[in-house]
Amino acid sequence: MKTNTSLSFVRFNGAKTMIAREMSAAELALFERGEELGYAAVEIDVAWRDALRACKLPSDRKVLRAGFVSAFMAAARATLKAANNKFDYMARQYAPASTSRKAKATAETRGRKAKAEAVVSKLSEKDVASRLTAALAYIAKAQQDHAGDGEMLETLGELAAILGGKTK
């Protein structure tokens, strides 16, 4: 990819903008290397995702691992263990959620909202009735304890009416 050699940046310094100086040859070389790394990162990301998606069976993944390990050991002069660890790391990083057993398991249990809704939806009518009865008994006891406090008695009476199914 061809870049503009007379590249300059606009820096934002608080509310003021100023034109930055032109990049030196070394800075331009670093900028171009950064662009190359950015494109390479995207290509690697896509390649890993496609390769892992293509693995339909555990034996497919073993074959993919064997190819990666042999090339990585030769290129990086790494040990077998280091190459296997690198494959495991990259596979975890780029595994599509549809093929990851761990991702599937955590997706079902992730988040407090999902857990709370699951608990509420599993309550039977008998459980709801017993909980309402316990709440009304607690309110009646609290009304006895706060007999002199008119404001508290009114609040407890409204709560009892709501739990009993009566509305104003």
Image (cartoon, helix red, strand yellow):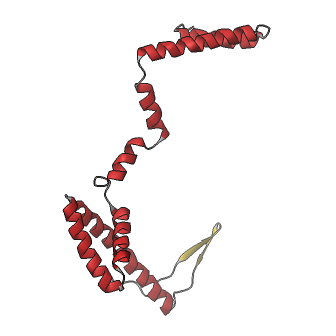
- Above or below, 15 relative to 68: above
Left or right, 18 with reference to 112: right
Q: Residue at x 24, y 60 (%)?
A: 53
Q: What x and y, as percent, mark residue 41? A: 36, 73
* Quadrant that contains the N terminus: bottom left
In-image side of 17 versus 103 (left or right): right
Residue found at the very far bottom of the displayed protein: 25
Q: Position of residue 128 (x, y in %)?
A: 47, 16
Is residue 140 toward the left or the right of residue 124 in the image? Answer: right
Tell me if I can see residue 6 in this picture: no
> Which residue is most to the right?
148
Provide residue 90's location: percent of width, then percent of height. Answer: 36, 68
User: Is residue 11 shown left or right of residue 114?
Assistant: right
Q: Is residue 80 above or below residue 54?
A: below
Residue located at (19% from left, 63% from top): 59
Instruction: Name the residue at 24% across, 73% down.
Output: 66
* Among the 4 quarters of the image, the one containing residue 64: bottom left
| Viewer-proximal residue among 17 and 86 | 86
Give the quadrant of the C terminus: top right
Residue positioned 41% across, 18% down in the render: 124
135 shown above or below 107: above
Q: Relative to the observer, which residue lies in front, 95 or 66?
A: 66
Q: Nearer the viewer, residue 31 or 115?
A: 115
Q: How many marks?
A: 0
Q: Position of residue 34 (x, y in %)?
A: 43, 80
